[in-house]
Image (cartoon, rainbow, N blue to C red):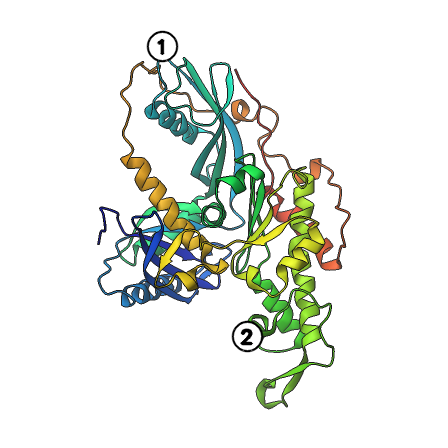
């Protein structure tokens, strides 16, 4: 199916709580026209890791079938897939290429070769590079070049964010998708896919922290001056809130999820303590009266756990004062009532809801502009960016690039001080915000187990 030679691109979001497939194409105005939409409950996936191959395949199959059922003319073979989880790391490095003759224009091929060389950067054998993001280009002695193509120079260099993932996590996702008969066009970091769907160039220039509150994790992507400064994963999400409700109120998980969606509130302030709702008792026990005030208290404490850590991390990176665009909340967890006001109160920063209405049109656009679908929409947008980049005319190579193969970048060369800076070697000052016992607990947990996800490698500029 093509309209004006535009392909149909399908995004597949394998989340902890839901699996979503969206098919869309660009119309004449450049917006995505949604052609098909399928959603089902996720099974076999948790924290971005496939735990049961057959169950994951079943979720994928059902989501794709629903997408095709919504538009029988669709023929879905290729998909763009998102990846997240506690195994994601963000490294920084720097690379350069020299040309034999100066005074000639830098071509797209020059830039592509510079980027491709970064895939030779040393990383642990258990990891795999899934994305290389260039920024801060330098041509000869001219710094901060946004787009070096067409500029005359003899040497081009840039800083890079290198996103890596556990090899087996990628393999299992690929197996799950390919065993359903689909072909993976590319795998993208979910935090960056969500960023594409809910921001524009002005947002990234002003500086924003995109916070995607998913089922089992909260993904963060921080941009300042149009440059990706940091990505990270917090091991808490909507499932944690549901589990807290279930434990705190002594009800079934399904009841807790329903209460969260229908009556959940991120702020307990102002809720009438005399308001109750009735839920069925467990195993023949009498029905239970649930206080809406108590429900909100449980949700507020769980949300503060997430927001406290975001603020804590921004302050450790010295970025909390640099983000004029503030925090953009997206993902299913961002749909809680009063979550914007609560986040604004805790962080002291500007906060807004991240939706993709700027990019969508068509039958399902009213539904899919909700924050819960931002990742899937972003995957389609990234797919189109890849497609259009491949179609871009390649400028003639007016000056030869030095042909010697680039050596494998060693850990010592890429990261001269340390490969990964362990949290134990760096004292962190707690933020001056309201701190709950649960927040201290998760801070300890993350420091001991997960802080490697947030650590960034100290880069050394090389001439």
Q: Residue furthest front?
A: 29
Residue pictured at 60% horizontal, 42% vertical:
454
Is 228 above or below relative to 23? Answer: above
* Res. 82 visible in picture: yes
Residue 134 horizontal/vertical position (percent): 46, 31
Residue pictured at 58% horizontal, 40% vertical:
207
Q: Are marks 2 and 1 in contact (CB under 8 Å)?
A: no
Asked whether, in this view, residue 360 is left or right of residue 319, the answer is left
Residue 127 horizontal/vertical position (percent): 46, 40
Is 371 above or below relative to 191? Answer: below
Question: Residue 220 bears which disc, if any?
Answer: none
Question: How dense is the environment of label 2, judged by Cα within 10 Å: few (below 14), some, or many (20 and up)?
Answer: few
How many marks are shown on the rendered structure?
Answer: 2
Question: How dense is the environment of label 1, judged by Cα within 10 Å: few (below 14), some, or many (20 and up)?
Answer: few
Asked whether, in this view, residue 278 is left or right of residue 61, the answer is right
Q: Nearer the viewer, residue 308 or 439?
A: 308
Q: Which residue is mark 1?
A: 100
Residue pictured at 34% horizontal, 47% vertical:
30
| Marks 2 and 1, the one that precedes in the sequence | 1
Q: Secondary structure at mark 2?
A: helix
Residue 126 horizontal/vertical position (percent): 47, 41
Q: Which residue is mark 2?
A: 258
Residue pictured at 62% horizontal, 60% vertical:
339
3D distance between C-alphas at marks 2 and 1:
65 Å
* Res. 171 visible in picture: no
- Quarter occupied by residue 230: top right
Quadrant in which the N terminus is drawn: bottom left
Q: Nearer the viewer, residue 216 or 330?
A: 330
Residue 388 horizontal/vertical position (percent): 31, 39
- Quarter occupied by residue 323: top right
Q: Secondary structure at mark 1?
A: loop
């Amino acid at each position: 199916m093509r309209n004006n030679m535009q392909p149909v691109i399908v995004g597949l979001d394998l989340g902890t709580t839901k699996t979503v497939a969206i098919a869309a194409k660009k119309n004449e105005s450049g917006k995505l026209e949604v052609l098909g939409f399928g959603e089902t409950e996720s099974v076999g996936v948790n924290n971005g890791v496939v735990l049961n191959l057959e169950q994951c395949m079943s979720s994928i199959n059902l989501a794709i079938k629903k997408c095709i059922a919504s538009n029988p003319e669709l023929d879905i073979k290729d998909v763009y897939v998102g990846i997240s989880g506690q195994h994601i790391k963000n490294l920084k490095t720097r690379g350069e290429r020299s040309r034999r003759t100066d005074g000639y224009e830098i071509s797209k091929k020059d830039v592509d070769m510079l980027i491709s060389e970064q895939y030779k950067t040393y990383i642990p054998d258990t990891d795999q590079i899934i994305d290389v993001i260039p920024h801060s280009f330098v041509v000869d002695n001219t710094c901060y070049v946004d787009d070096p193509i067409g500029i005359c120079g003899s040497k081009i260099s840039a800083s890079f964010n290198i996103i890596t993932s556990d090899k087996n996590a990628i393999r299992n996702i690929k197996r799950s998708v390919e065993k359903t008969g689909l072909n993976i066009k590319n795998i993208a970091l979910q935090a960056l896919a969500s960023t594409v769907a809910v921001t524009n160039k002005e947002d990234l220039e002003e500086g924003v922290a995109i916070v995607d509150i998913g089922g089992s994790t909260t993904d963060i992507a921080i941009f300042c001056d149009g440059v990706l400064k940091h990505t990270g994963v917090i091991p808490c999400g909507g499932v944690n809130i549901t589990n807290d409700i279930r434990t705190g109120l002594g009800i079934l998980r399904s009841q807790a999820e329903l209460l969260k969606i229908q009556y959940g509130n991120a702020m307990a302030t102002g809720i009438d303590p005399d308001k109750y709702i009735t839920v069925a008792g467990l195993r023949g026990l009498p029905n239970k009266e649930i206080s809406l005030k108590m429900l909100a208290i449980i949700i507020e404490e769980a949300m503060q756990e997430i927001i406290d850590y975001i603020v804590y991390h921004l302050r450790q990176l010295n970025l909390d004062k640099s983000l004029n665009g503030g925090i953009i909340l997206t993902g299913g967890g961002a749909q809680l009532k009063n979550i914007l006001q609560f986040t604004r109160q805790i962080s002291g920063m500007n906060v807004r809801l991240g939706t993709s209405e700027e990019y969508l049109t068509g039958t399902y656009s009213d539904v899919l502009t909700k924050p819960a679908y931002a990742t899937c929409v972003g995957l389609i947008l990234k797919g189109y960016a890849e497609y259009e980049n491949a179609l871009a005319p390649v400028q003639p190579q007016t000056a030869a690039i030095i042909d010697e193969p680039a050596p494998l970048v060693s850990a010592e060369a890429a990261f001269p001080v340390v490969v990964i800076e362990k949290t134990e070697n760096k004292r962190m000052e707690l933020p001056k915000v309201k701190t709950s016992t649960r927040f201290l607990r998760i801070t300890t947990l993350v420091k001991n187990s997960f802080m490697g996800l947030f650590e960034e490698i100290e880069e050394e500029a090389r001439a």
